[in-house]
Image (tube, rainbow, N blue to C red):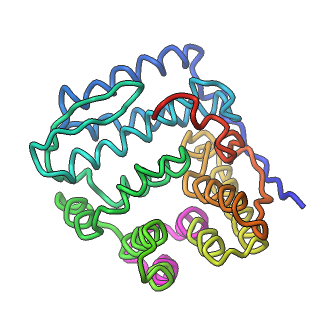
Amino acid sequence: MTLYIPSHDLSHRVEPNHWESSENNRNEWSSILESNPESVDLALGSLHMDVMFSTAADPGVERLESWQAWTTDMQMYHALFAVETNPPGADLELMVHHKIRRPKATGPSYAASASNWTTAFFLAVICRDQKRYRELCEISVDLLREAGESEGAQYNPFTYHWISALQAFVLNRPGLGEELLAAMELSTPDRVDFGDTELLDKLVFPPMNAFLRLVERDSDKFNEALAQGVALHADYYTANESRANDIEGVVPLGLLAMACLAYDTAESDPDFHLDVESGYLPKRLVERNWYGEFPI
């Protein structure tokens, strides 16, 4: 039985000229990779918001322009880590927005952070770019901690265990269970150093819970965890008018990545099945309908 979770409408947040400005935005920010690689992080917010607004305008990701927004965002997040984790001065070749860019590596800055890493990883999984998400998983957690906290930012310890668990899963390293259990336990409101209880319970914990069930290859529990997570996302982002207008609520990135992993798992494992659908989980992304449309 398919579980369906309705999504709330954010199309009213989209400007009438969105698609034209979206293309201009991608062209402008993609060029910064070669012209000013030290400032790649400045492009991330704009390109990521472009994804959110494009998905609000096109919830099913039916338009090619929407897929272009997703892939460019993914490419630039990966490019940030390529630029900042390769030896300074190294020549790089990176595909971003239909063009090979040739920046030089700069070495790490505060932007090579845990939060940017998880976004980069989820985007690469959603776009099914295995090469990129494997490269991201080769980046040491110690580097992310040192660079990301170099200018005073702080992350709860569970964040690094969560990243370690994802890396262990992708690279088939030992310690997956221990790292995931630590991440889940340390993300509870009574164990964190800081953080809003509602946000932790409704946005942070659900992707970990769904991932646990995916790792266990338990379809029923995975579908239950995914559906519950999507419902909690909806609950959080419709709790009041301010949140209901927050463009970040258009899609739960981590849960969407888990749905994509589950869809791919179901294709190779006849005993596993994905039975959750939602406007928050664009079907064309989950079922990788756009994959291969153009080189990424």
Decide if residue 161 is on the left or right side of residue 103: right
Decide if residue 238 is on the left or right side of residue 22: right
Residue 96 is a magenta residue: no
Using the image, determine if residue 200 lies above or below residue 72: below
Place of residue 9 in the rendered image (x, y in percent of width and height, measured from the top left): 71, 37
Place of residue 206 in the rendered image (x, y in percent of width and height, measured from the top left): 61, 67
Quadrant of the rendered image containing residue 73: top left
Place of residue 205 in the rendered image (x, y in percent of width and height, measured from the top left): 56, 70
Using the image, determine if residue 161 lies above or below residue 269: below
Residue drawn where x is 63% and y is 51% of the image: 237
Decide if residue 137 is on the left or right side of residue 83: right
Which residue is most to the left?
89
Residue drawn where x is 61% and y is 46% of the image: 251
Residue 199 is a magenta residue: yes
Using the image, determine if residue 116 lies above or below residue 62: below
Residue drawn where x is 65% and y is 25% of the image: 63
Quadrant of the rendered image containing residue 106: top left
Q: Quadrant of the C terminus?
A: top left
Identify the main secondary structure in magenta.
Answer: helix
Residue drawn where x is 57% and y is 20% of the image: 15
Using the image, determine if residue 33 lies above or below residue 131: above
Which residue is most to the right?
1
Q: Nearer the viewer, residue 219 or 50?
A: 219
Place of residue 52 in the rendered image (x, y in percent of width and height, measured from the top left): 54, 37
Q: Quadrant of the N terminus?
A: bottom right
The image shows a total of numbered marks equal to 0
**Residue range highlighted in magenta:** 181-206
